[in-house]
Amino acid sequence: MRLPSKEEVRRVRERFPAGCRVELISMGPDPYSKLKKGDRGTVSSVDDIGTVFVNWDCGSGLGMVYGEDEIRRLEVKTSSMMGETRFQHGSSKERPVT
């Protein structure tokens, strides 16, 4: 596993700030995790090696490892008709893991 540069970590932190919503696209092998593609959660932080820590809606607190796992940021769209907020997929895959 290659560690990300400071610039790569900076970009990950910009793309996945604390509080943003994400969706799991894929993750490396983890026999203890029950996360599956499509699970959603809220970013809590990004550490100095680019791991994106997520509080998953299913109750897990697993971090997404740079270079191994793939998540997508969900964009918030507000409907003016009913004043409701919906989470929709971003337009492209986001990889804190390249």
Image (spheres, rainbow, N blue to C red):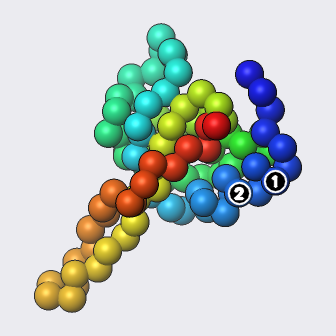
Quarter holding the C terminus is top right
Residue drawn at 60 percent across, 60 percent down: 15
Label 2 belongs to which residue? Answer: 11
Specify the quadrant of the image occupied by residue 14: bottom right
Q: What crowding class fits label 1: few (fewer than 14 Cα within 10 Å), some (14-19), or many (20 or more)?
A: few
Whether residue 62 can be seen here: no
Q: Residue at x 44, y 31 (%)?
A: 26
Q: Is residue 94 above or below residue 87?
A: above
Question: Where 27 sits versus 19, above or below?
Answer: above
Which residue type does callout 2 highlight? Answer: Arg
Q: CA distance from mark 2 to mark 1?
A: 6 Å
Q: Which residue is disc 1 drawn over?
A: 7
- Horizontal arrangement in the rendering, residue 57 relative to residue 20 (left or right): left
Find residue 49 and report its image quarter: top right
Q: Is residue 71 visible?
A: yes
Left/right placement of residue 9 relative to residue 88 reads right
**Quadrant holding the N terminus:** top right
Residue pictured at 76% horizontal, 57% vertical: 10
* Residue at disc 1, secondary structure: helix
Q: Position of residue 37 (x, y in %)?
A: 34, 33
Against 69, is 44 above or below? below
Whether residues under marks 2 and 1 lie with C-beta atoms below 8 angstroms apart, the answer is yes
User: Which residue is farthest left?
Assistant: 81
- Determine crowd level at label 2: few under 14, some 14-19, many 20+ residues with C-alpha closer than 10 A: few
- Residue extending furthest bottom? 80
Residue nearest the viewer, comparing 65 with 92:
92
In percent of width and height, residue 31 lies at: 47, 11
